[in-house]
Image (cartoon, rainbow, N blue to C red):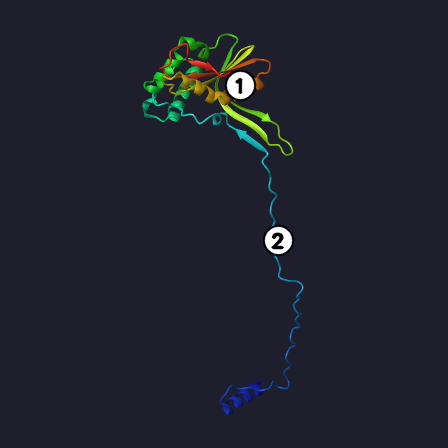
Amino acid sequence: LRTALARVRAAAEASEGPAACEDPDDWVRPPEPVRAPPDASAGTPRAIVWRPPVLGERMRVVLPSATGTGLAPHPEGGPVPGGLTPREFGTRVHRLLQEAAESGRLPAGEGPVHEEGRGVFKDPDLAWVFHPTEGERALCEVPFIHRTRSGGPGRVEERVTGVIDRLIVRPDEVVVIDYKTNRLGPDPAYREALIEHYRPQMEAYRAAAAALYPGRTVRALLLWTDPAISAPKRYDEAE
């Protein structure tokens, strides 16, 4: 090794360019690795992407309240009291009537919501709604899921889901009641239009109740809470 370094140093001193020398006789270079020629037929490797199969629709859920026409819920002649939106006002009246029906008395309170609820709960013609007699069963806010169409190959199953405000169960009859806080206004035609608007919803309720209580007559009623309505015109039957 020292002899080889001496040769490199001597060659560098004798030349102005880069030093170069042959390997010493006692050095043996290792063999070059054998490289296989590239396979032209293999081409460029491609990534395989797995795509899951697309499943078709199997079940469709329908809300009864989403059916009907796009009728405006409150005509110009009857704004909602209390500075609330129609939905907020309706929700509060529904909740108040539910508490009154479950407890048998109207919760204490004042304001437009209580005034409207009081007018309905205290109406003698509606006592049968909130005070069931012997042999009757009355329920509030009854949830249901009703299958209206079976599924199968190429066929989507359809179910209707909703909540019935008040359900009166009698030995031979079932009465479905839905509270409506719409302001009916002075035009009788508007009331008829509202009944037609809510008919698909009430038909869905009626079908669900008929499936729950087979063999009994089922009636579906729209109960209007508008204080401008005088008894006995508080409700209409959605036939």
Please name the amino acid that badge 2 sits on: Ile
Q: Is residue 39 above or below residue 139?
A: below
> Depth check: 148 or 130 in front?
148
> Depth check: 155 or 131 in front?
155
Instruction: Count how many numbered circles sit on residues in the image.
Output: 2
Q: Residue 165 at x, y = what percent? A: 47, 19
**Residue at point 51% right, 10% down?**
136
**Residue at point 57% right, 29% down?**
158
Q: Is residue 37 above or below residue 187?
A: below
> Depth check: 42 or 73 in front?
73
Q: Residue 204 at x, y = what percent? A: 53, 22
* Residue 71 makes an appearance in the image: yes
Q: Residue 62 at x, y = what percent? A: 52, 28
Q: Is residue 92 left or right of residue 136?
A: left
Q: Residue 68 at x, y = what percent? A: 48, 25
Q: Is residue 82 left or right of residue 178?
A: left
Residue beneath label 2, please?
Answer: 48
Q: Is residue 138 above or below residue 163?
A: above
Residue beneath label 1, please?
Answer: 206
Q: Is residue 151 left or right of residue 181?
A: right
Please name the amino acid that badge 1 sits on: Arg
Q: Secondary structure at mark 2?
A: loop
* Residue 108 makes an appearance in the image: no
Q: Nearer the viewer, mark 1 or mark 2?
A: 1
> If you read the primary sequence from the N terminus, does the residue marked by circle 1 or circle 2 appear first?
2
Residue 120 lies in quadrant? top left
Q: Is residue 35 above or below residue 139?
A: below
Q: Residues within 10 Å of mark 2 (few under 14, many from 20)?
A: few
